[in-house]
Amino acid sequence: MRVAQTESHHANGASTVLLDRSDVSEVSEALAAIRRPVAVVRSAHGPKPVLLDPAGQLTPEILGQNLLAILPAIYPEWLGDRSFTATHRVRFPYVIGEMARGIATPQMTVEGVRAGGMAFFGSAGLDLAAIEAGVREIQSALGRDVGGWGANLIHNVQSDGVELATVDLFHRLGVRYVSASAFMQLTPAVVLYAVKGLRRGTDGRIMRAGRIFAKVSRDEVARQFLSPAPEPMLRALVAEGRITADEAALARGIPIAEDITAEADSGGHTDNRALTVLLPRLIDLRDDIAADYGYDVLPRVGAAGGLGTPAAVAAAFAAGAAYVLTGSVNQSALESGLSADARGLLAAAQSTDVAMAPAADMFEMGVTVQVLKRGTMFAQRAQRLGDFYRRHASLDDAPTDALKNLETAVLGLGVDQIWAETESFFATRDPQQIERARSDPKHRMALVFRWYLFNGAQWAREGNTARRADYQIWCGPAMGAFNEWVRGSFLEPVGARTVRQIALNLLEGAATVTRAGQLRTAGVAMPASAFDFRPRPLG
């Protein structure tokens, strides 16, 4: 019985008009057994798939059916660059990204590694004591010698000292991977982490003590991470005794990072770039820079942003991504540092339920982050703070009624009380901020407004439902796409979501979609369901 009409096409010299039910069954079998090779043979209805045994043995029966093509087995482990899994000693070309302020918890990091991927602890925005506690928790769970995990180093526009202190801590604790994010240019801390511990192996190759994964969305930033360390920074670090002359010499022949992530339309800090534009561009840039410097090892380019479904992950790999990195979707997982209340809001989001809002760490610069707007008023209220900051020279300069309205409708506290809390916070963390605020009323206003932006994320983590309307939840469109994909499946309930099941299903689904694409390219007529992998318990 013929059940599904397809467009007429010519594949391998054969014309197919109708899809037979038996053909649908054969396609389904080929998609369900992606780890076995497939032969494509000519049939009365056009090319059809025939599963081969695991060894790919071509029997006389198959050879007698007018063989058109042979498709290899597909494993999720093989979707990306094999050098990624070999170098970092992980099973999958998959990274669980660092969500700052501890949202990517030590538990999430551990479970990500145990699932076979790489994972980064969301250490950005935490104090040094909290970072150390988190790193030690990971090491205790996995063992100090287990790789495949790292921590986050985020650009601190207020103080290079914070970055350097964080890198010193990473070195002391033996953190071998760092994800560098939100950097607009290289800083001494980044160079220090990349260079310290460099040595030449017995085979003559340069060995790294620490590896950097750099999230980038602009050519000019990618170029810096793909190039050797700047000479002035190397000389300064040698003069300060932070690196040796030998380490500096070795650094001149390798890039700062051998893994850069093309960060497209993601949650949090983002330039809202289209991955289909950004990824090929950065791959081309990588090729040019690697050729110019004659690197022994070709840096890898991964993909992030918008990866919430198997089709999106498969598309990233098809476009040349060496690995994929997920972020937003993991925030709704059980291991996330977000409260159950905030995770519930994420699980209800659609792909359009996002907005841009001022960033707490770069507020004065006008930098924005992408956040969830469904179920919270944070984006609108934060934008009001940004507008107020641009219009007035100081809090005292603002009209009394306007300031009072801001306190009532946005901040939820008086500015004097907020300033008292702010002084207490920075007194031990960064006293220079307080000193500057006393002489610069505009800076004092910025710190008061940053209190709201900072606490918006804190309230979401704590599940402070009294401030639910002020939750700051970093979120990209991928979250809504993921929610739609898992609707009706075992992953729809937020309480059932784990980073392991999210990762395995995205990868298994991506491999299945890839096989469907290969079959279609070989001329097999595909049913509508062929590219629709449904979540299922795996592993």
Image: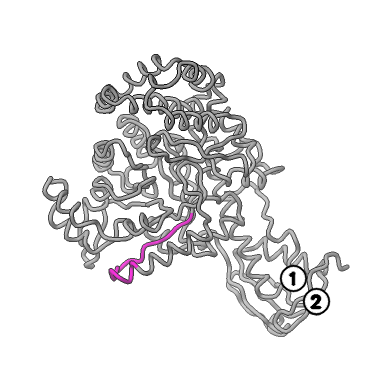
- Mark 1 and 2 residues: CB-CB less than 8 Å, in contact? yes
In this rendering, does residue 92 appear at all? Answer: no
In this rendering, does residue 160 appear at all? Answer: yes
Q: Secondary structure at mark 2?
A: loop
Q: CA distance from mark 1 to mark 2?
A: 9 Å
Query: Which kind of residue does numbered mark 2 sit on?
Result: His
Of residues 8 and 414, the one nearer the viewer is 414
- Is residue 169 on the magenta stretch? no
Q: Which numbered tag is attached to residue 45?
A: 2
Stretch in magenta:
289-303
Query: In the rendered image, which quarter is residue 414 located in?
Result: top left
In the picture of the structure, the residue carrying the numbered disc 1 is: 525
Residue 294: image location, x then y, percent: 29, 71
* Residue in view at x 38 percent, y 28 percent: 446
Query: In the rendered image, which quarter is residue 418 located in?
Result: top left
* Residue in view at x 82 percent, y 74 percent: 17
